[in-house]
Amino acid sequence: MNKTITLSAAPTGMQPGGYVPVAFADRTEAATPSATIEAVAAGNGWRITLSWACASPVRHTANETDRFPDACAVLAPVAPDSPWITMGEPGKAVEGFLWKADREQPLHIRAEGLGSAQRAAPPEGTRVTADWRDGHWQVVFEIPAWSALAAQRQLAVAVWAGAAQERAGLKSVSPGWLPLG
């Protein structure tokens, strides 16, 4: 797969808790309107490249509680009918990998619904490289094995623009599961 996709703002009304749905009710436009994704099988694993325009990168946020780093994630459904927009649901998980500009290593994530994301160290051999140049981020995930992606052959993506104060459920997302072909 190698394609440019249109991203949309994750719906704030479905975010858990009471603050985000009220404070960000007017956030209906994606801060990152599009991204390019390339997913290639590499041996038993995967090489996934995600790139998007970003005029003002945010890499470091230490000791600044009102700043958020740029980030992106790639997700795959564990079950064929795991919903992407809610990050799965009980018994129908999603899993993936999260890169944040202020971390050297990616995180492995797994969720069964909004607010249920669990983060852990990635499997050994997982690498991520990120480069911001000429107003664009390019993030390359090298994943030695990913059984959910191999089985379901679908991906979803999320991008967080730190300069737009995006974090948690405030993000730009793919229009649904993207088939690998």
Image (tube, helix red, strand yellow):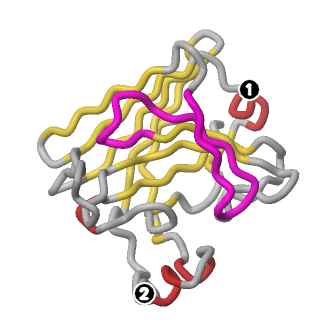
Asked whether 169 or 2 is in front, the reply is 169
Splitting the image into 4 quarters, where does residue 146 fall? top right
In the figure, is residue 131 to the left or right of 77? left
Q: Residue furthest front?
A: 63
Question: The N terminus appears in which quarter of the rendering?
Answer: top right
**Rendering quarter of residue 108:** top right
Q: Which circle's residue, 1 or 2, is located before the other in the chain?
A: 2
Give me the residue at 52% from left, 70% from top.
10
The amino acid sitting under disc 1 is Ser
Q: Residue 147 carries which label?
A: 1
Name the residue tied to disc 2. 23
Rendering coords of residue 168 (x, y %) = 48, 61
Name the residue at 54% across, 42% down.
74
Say left or right for 49 vs 16.
left
Determine the CA span between mark 1 and mark 2.
38 Å
Bounds of the magenta segment: 99-121
**Is residue 38 placed above or below 24 in the rendered structure?**
above
> On the rendered image, what quadrant is the C terminus found in?
top right
Vertical position of residue 135 compared to residue 19: above or below: above
Label 2 crowd bin: few (<14), some (14–19), many (20+), radius 10 Å: few
Asked if the residue at tag 2 contacts the one at tag 1, i.e. Cβ–Cβ closer than 8 Å, the answer is: no
Looking at the rendered structure, the number of numbered marks drawn on it comes to 2
Question: Where does residue 54 sit, x and y in percent of width and height?
Answer: 22, 54
Residue found at the far right of this picture = 91
